Amino acid sequence: MQLVVWLSVMLSVLYSQETNACPDQCSCSKSSSCNGTDVNCEGKGLSRVPTNIPTDTCILNLKRNQITILPDGILDTLINLQYINLRWNLITTLPEAIFDRLVNLLALSLRDNRITTLPRGIFDNLVNLTTLYLSNNQITTLQKQGFGRLMKLQTIAVDGNPLNCDCRLVAFLGFAESRTLTLKISKEPSCQSPLNLKGTLLKDKVLQEMVCDSGKLFILVLQILVLNKHAFLLI
């Protein structure tokens, strides 16, 4: 009987230690703004996301580290996350399903990284998201399809990216206007290319007046002419 009691006590202690574990170099505390743990790993020189983050974490601060990649599934157990800050890291790519389990997320900061592209559907499951910071990356293309399911989104900051002023961007701007989204944090976002539109602010009228359908029609006509030319050469 005493052995059973002793084992029960030991298992309880071990379980308690496991659930209350905190990643090395980070600090953990009861959050005052959400129901769970606040994990602060800011400026710890981390090269990867810690693997032993408490599962009840609702705030995760990984700002000012040297994280280069987010491995598939690294965030899957953190379903209670409401705020995650990955600002000032060295992230270049994002796995397609990296945020799929974070259905309670309200704010996500990916500012000041080296992200070049946003995989299709990467934010689709973030149905509660209100704030998305993408500023100061290397993103050239924004497509409205990538944000269409984020019905609660209010801010999607894109300033500081080398955006290409093409028809996809025009469609995205139309989408942002229809949702009255904020597109900046500190400065007005602008285009980097093509050269004739370099420096054009996204709020400028010249982008709103771009006629993309005509451009597509021109390309289609050009393709038909090229095909016809080849057909004549074959006769």
Image (cartoon, rainbow, N blue to C red):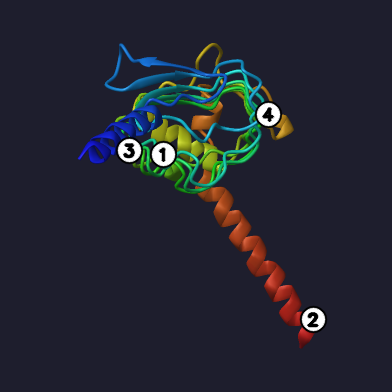
Identify the amino acid type marked 4.
Gln
Identify the amino acid type marked 1.
Phe
- Under tag 4, what secondary structure? strand
> Crowdedness of circle 1 by 10 Å Cα count: few (<14), some, many (20+)?
many
- Where is mark 4, residue-wise? 192
Mark 3 to mark 1 CA distance (whole Å): 15 Å
Identify the amino acid type marked 2.
Leu
- Under tag 2, what secondary structure? helix
- Residue 103 badge: 3
- Residue 233 badge: 2
- Where is mark 1, residue-wise? 147
- Under tag 3, what secondary structure? loop
Is 169 situated left or right of 89 in this image? left
- Mark 3 or 1: in front is 3
Q: Give whichever of discs 2 and 3 has the lower sequence position.
A: 3
Residue 193 rendering spot, x and y as whole percentages:
69, 33
- Mark 2 or 3: in front is 3
Identify the amino acid type marked 3.
Val
Mark 3 to mark 4 CA distance (whole Å): 34 Å
- Which residue shows up at 48% across the image and 33% down it? 52
- Residue 21 visible, this angle: yes
